[in-house]
Image (spheres, coloured by chain):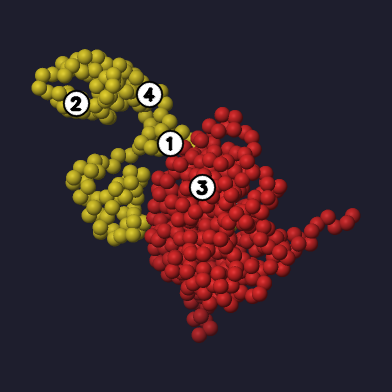
Amino acid sequence: MRNPLADKVVGIKPSGIRKFFDVVSEMPDAISLGVGEPDFDTPWHVREEGIYSLERGRTFYTSNAGLMELRTAISRYLYKKLDLHYDPKTEIVVTVGGSEGIDLALRAMLNPGDEVILPEPAYVSYAPCVTLAGGNTVTINLQEKNRFKLTAEELLDAITDRTKILILSYPNNPTGAIMTREDLEPIARIIQEKDIFVISDEIYSELTYGKNHVSIASLPGMQERTVVINGFSKAFAMTGWRLGYAAGPELIMEQMIKIHQFAIMAAPTTSQYAGVEALANGEDDVQEMRTSYNQRRRFVLDQFKQMGLQCFEPEGAFYMFPSISEFGMSSDEFATRFLEEEKVAVVPGTAFGECGEGFLRVSYAYSLEELKEALGRMAEFVRRLRAKKQAGDANRG
Amino acid sequence: MHNAILKMLENNSRIDLHDLAVMMGTDEAVIVEEIEKMEKDGVICGYPTLINWDKTTEEKVSAMIEVRVTPQRGQGFERLAERITNYPEVKAVYLMSGGYDFLVSLEGKTLKEVSMFVTSKLSTLDAVAGTATHFVLKKYKDHGIILIDKPQSSRMKVTL
Ligand SMILES: Cc1ncc(COP(=O)(O)O)c(C=O)c1O
């Protein structure tokens, strides 16, 4: 038999984290701070609208780009929240999660050999999608001392003649970092000078604590070179509905919609009706969830402080990215031992790029009780490691 | 600040005040002071525990009683309401709009005990013109808390 597989796909290395996942799934009694989705159920009125749409027999395909009603609501929402202006007829496509939007944008824009700049640590799907779209990923190792923001110098260093796209992902998974308007301005200048495009994944845009999210597309001259990715998963606790959207200049969106039309047809109809309700009446739910995440963010940060774990203060998403470099072991080793010895799952920073070495991703999308239990075990684990290290140092000394 | 504290306490009155302070980004002393003030002002009226008695060996019957009232000259509803609140078996008294005047929530050991209370005590009050007693068969949700068994969360342990 011939080899049935495509080299490009086989060449994508399975996420190193798979092994770790397998161990976790075989430990039913393990508790976890490892989940990248909200702990809230989707607000009831939104679920009800999905149910109602089924009752009324809304069980057909929608138009390829999505229900006009939903695209109009998205357009209004983006204007109100982020000062973005998109024509619902030509500049917005409703997708199967932000995930699909990322894939569409890359496939619509990349020619073989084009380079995509990817600041890491980053969400895991970008690099494989770049590969599948025929591009090459050029990574930037973001620095904790810069609060994991992308700086102008880092960007300039990474740009070559082949650079076509910068992927920008703030508020960030896994670091919780955000970028303010002042942070984005120099980046936007370089993007325009060097004639590059931006895919801006703003899926956590509703989850910032203190400063409101600013979309790079809202900066002068940037809308025409940016594809904004967003969705319902994180803002409205709707991960399982698989509903997101992309917005950008018609020139690009036309091609993205073409791929979407042939590969997906349309996003799930039930989810789209629920999405209309979420945008129309979900503002209070978002506010309530944001407040609750913020309270837990403060709690976890305080716990780390008490443990003496170094962690910069994240201002977005629902993750902490504490440093474990003091223990002289890899992230993977720390996470594996923590799981084995204390039965708590956290994600090694290296799952999000090599520069995540020395860090852990800790999600605080858990109840206060769960956080207390898990962080209590973490304090114990850390105390034990330090005691052992001290004993070792004393022996050597 | 007050409302934020109240919201947290309403969900969990046993929350550790240090944790509460951390989560609100303030000091424990501030929280303690605010709570004491709200207790004194009658904003916080108590910290009862929500118990699902169906899961205990204790026999309990609860009922909702609609009470229609002939208001007494110069007294309005207040005097009667006050009298009704004095009975220890009465758990709640509300003045209502609509087809009747008071809704009285009652708890007793047996159906008979509750019925006796209504016929011998409540209905005999001067201003009471009539009552309708509704026994509670099952409580599904109380004080915002779902009492029936919920399906376990289907969230996975680790996702990226
Ligand atoms: C940064 C980032 N982008 C996109 C996604 C995908 O979200 P969706 O559920 O909308 O596909 C995630 C999910 O974890 C994410 O963290």
Question: Residue at image x 50%, y 44%?
Answer: A73
Mark 3 highlights which residue? A74
Mark 1 highlights which residue? B146
The residues tagged by marks 1 and 4 sit, at their Cα atoms, a distance apart of: 16 Å
Q: Give percent across and percent down for residue A235.
A: 49, 50
The residues tagged by marks 1 and 2 sit, at their Cα atoms, a distance apart of: 30 Å
Q: Nearer the viewer, mark 3 or mark 4?
A: 3
Left or right, A30 with respect to B40, comes to right
Please state the chain letter of the residue tagged with numbered disc 3 in the rendered image. Answer: A
Q: Quadrant of the C terminus of chain B?
A: bottom right
Q: Quick one: A327 or A132, which is closer to the camera?
A: A132
Whether A154 is drawn above or below B70: the answer is below
Q: Name the residue furthest bottom.
A: A397
SS for callout 2: helix
Amino acid residing under circle 1: Ile
Question: Residue at image x 55%, y 33%?
Answer: A53
- Inspect this view and state whether residue A160 appears: yes
Amino acid residing under circle 4: Val
The residues tagged by marks 2 and 3 sit, at their Cα atoms, a distance apart of: 52 Å
Amino acid residing under circle 2: Ala
